[in-house]
Image (cartoon, helix red, strand yellow):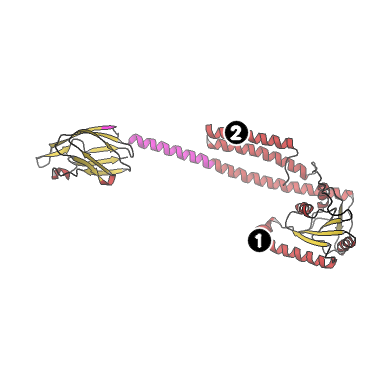
Amino acid sequence: MRSPFSSETEAFRSVVLLALALIAVVLAAVLGPAWLALAILVVALGAVGVRAAQLHMRRLRGLVLPVKMAPPHVGSAEERRVLVLANDTLGEESLLSEVSRLAGAPHTHVLLLVPALITSGARLTGAVDGLLEQTRARLNEALERVGHDSVVKGEVSQADPLEAVEDAFATFTPDEVIVSTRWERSSGGLEPQLAGLVRERFAVPVRHLVFDPGSVAQQPDQATEARYRREFGDAAARRFALRALAGAGITAAVVMSMVALIRSTEKHEARLASQAAAEAAVLPPVAKMVVLKVIPEYKVGPEGEKHDAFTTTEFSVRVGRPQQLQIDNTDEVPHSITAPDAGVNIVVMPGVHTYTLVVKRTGRFIWFCTFRCDEWAMEHTGYMSGYITAT
């Protein structure tokens, strides 16, 4: 993959800018709201993206020339390797005659490279295999007509034509390149500008052969090659600009959705916190310590008799928060505060002692004394039974 930057200095400046932006993002995430950090990150990435897009547009329009690659010669001094790049012109007799002529020269090897020109639509719809089969069939037919099986080889590439040429330079290492196209861009054919791109990219001789159907090969003059480059650069720049605008629109929509989601989440969390605070404000008060007694024959029942009783039988606690109970059991036997549903079982021994009441879930739970004492009082709340309310 080529760098979108024109120089190491340009790349270094972009990296420094991105690093400073990331520092600002971290500070904003720590000190400010999440949406502000996201906004800073988007602005920074947008600035880098705009600069990269500007450089790419300059390259497409020919304002920035790439550095030429000069591959080393492979084989003996007499050996010659020729790369022929073609697609819809494979059936032209004059092209095949030229390939046959080259193959007949001593110490010459020819690679017939055919880019399949697979479109994005074909990749999305799964029509790649059909296009590859058609391209292989066209290549095999051309190889049969040329002959010279020992020195002429063929290859089908799924890559972009210029990338396919770069791959061929890494594996075949040609000393010369022949690019075969139509005079004008045709559906399913190579760009006429491809020869100029290869010529600018590689320091080897490049011949551009152009055809009208059924005609002999010709080579375009400099004015035609300049027109090819200008038209190709303008068209590529327009396509890139449209894609960039579409990408920017999609990115903006995603970012706006993320910001809205973050802000909505923050508002929801703030609303929940406010509701929790409001609910806490209306909850019944909870004492850190409750002081009470157990007194035999203390409280008169509805039938007029006195019964054993706790002086406090209603307890309010916070879930998971311990509450201290200082109980003076004036009886001579133990009693208890037992609430099975709340997981509470406090044995109250005679005398003054401090106990801890902890409830681990919300609810209103009935408690009672499990030690045999006043049977009537054990079955009636407000005496030896009551409620624990956990909030």
- Viewer can see residue 182: no
- The quadrant in which residue 183 appears is bottom right
Give the labeled residue for mark 1. Answer: 126
Residue 65, horizontal then vertical, whole percent: 80, 42
Q: Which mark is residue 220?
A: none
Residue 66 or 111: which is nearer the viewer?
111
Using the image, determine if residue 34 lies above or below residue 240.
Answer: above
What residue is shown at x 67% (from left), y 34% (from top)?
16
Most extreme residue toward the front is 76
Secondary element under disc 1, as helix, strand or loop, is loop
Mark 1: which amino acid?
Answer: Gly
The image quadrant of residue 121 is: bottom right
> Where 246 falls versus 314 (above or below)?
below
Q: Residue at x 28, y 44 (%)?
A: 342
Residue 386 location (% of width, % of height):
21, 41
Question: Label 2, on which residue?
Answer: 23
